Image (spheres, rainbow, N blue to C red):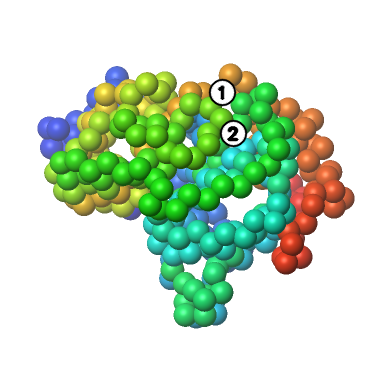
Amino acid sequence: MSWQPCHEPECEAQPNDVGLVIEPTARDLGGFSVRRVLPSGRRRMVGPFIFFDHMGPAKFEPGRGIDVRPHPHIGIATVTYLFEGRILHRDNLGCVQPIDAGALNWMTAGRGIVHSERSDPEERARGPRLHGIQSWVALPRDLEEIEPSFDHYPAYALPTIERDGATMRVVAGEAYGELSPATTLSPLYYVDATLRAESEIRLPNAYPEHAVYVVEGEVTVAGRCLQGGRMIVLGGAADAVMRARSDSRMMLLGGAPLEEERYIWWNFVSSSQARIERAKDDWKNGRFEPVPADDDFMPLPER
């Protein structure tokens, strides 16, 4: 799928309202391909969101699945949200948690955490399906070294709004008058929105930066046509209208940008390059606590 301008009058470009359209790049995660949207060469962050991967949709043969070996993070919260399938999360805090479609795994790495993500054994046996989004939220500088933690929120715990052909699930933050139970450390919102053809919604207000990622379908956003697999960044365009040209699904995200620059190297994010170097040395020399019952590990990349 590709982004392209439409020819109907309602889809004529409005450059004053519309920001950057980001084309994803394919990345191989050890036999499983994802579409990476953030960071890109043209835009590194939207609000505090510094990483955004679209996983799948994929169907594996029986006995196969994903095996993301234990690996470390610092300075971020990882946000896993699935549309289909199940992933088994394990971390070095001792948490073991399957995540199903519609639920939320929110893991705050802070000063450092290690986790693995693998296909659920029962799902693997029959040939798992997987479709979802993994994103990272950078932490404010004074909270980058917070104690690591892990929280799981089942689908029924996330507030849902239905109106005029649209359904919005507030995954994190506050939007459309509803507040997610997820504990966030800076102002942000993250919404799973499904729209029937010809229905429309507006972006939530009260945030200085916004983006829309079209998971599937075709949507006009502030006068531009966007097909599945593309993100549009909208600055402070809180009044931007999203109209579905077909049955569509989108992730809406944004928030307040962090004051300081963030550096990213592999799985490490920090406002300090020296802190990233220390994390690299700690992982290379085995100073992170291992994940119980998962003694494999992901080596530090050479570059």
Q: Quadrant of residue 237?
A: top left
Point 47% across, 56% down: residue: 55
In this rendering, position of residue 113 left or right of residue 260: right
Q: CA distance from mark 2 to mark 1?
A: 8 Å
Point 42% across, 38% down: residue: 180
Is the residue marked by circle 2 packed among few (<14), some (14-19), or many (20+) residues within 10 Å?
many
In this rendering, position of residue 277 left or right of residue 115: right
Point 80% across, 49% down: residue: 288
Q: Quadrant of residue 189?
A: top left
In this rendering, position of residue 259 left or right of residue 163: right
Measuring from the top left, give residue 263's x and y in whole percent. 66, 32
Looking at the image, is 207 positioned above or below residue 149? above
Residue labelled with disc 1? 258
Mark identifier at residue 138: 2
Measuring from the top left, give residue 76's x and y in whole percent. 62, 38
| Callout 2 touching callout 1 (CB < 8 Å) | yes
Could you tell me if residue 216 is visible in this image?
yes
Is the residue marked by circle 1 packed among few (<14), some (14-19), or many (20+) residues within 10 Å?
some
Mark identifier at residue 187: none
Q: Which amino acid, by three-letter code, is at mark 2?
A: Ala
Q: Secondary structure at mark 2?
A: strand
Measuring from the top left, give residue 229's x and y in whole percent. 37, 49
Camera-nearest residue between 65 and 145: 145
Q: Quadrant of residue 291?
A: bottom right
In this rendering, position of residue 271 left or right of residue 201: right
Camera-nearest residue between 30 and 150: 150
Measuring from the top left, give residue 224's x and y in whole percent. 25, 34
Point 23% across, 35% down: residue: 201
Q: Secondary structure at mark 1?
A: loop
Could you tell me if residue 21 is visible in this image?
no
Q: Which amino acid, by three-letter code, is at mark 1?
A: Leu
* Mark before the other along the chain sequence, 2 or 1: 2
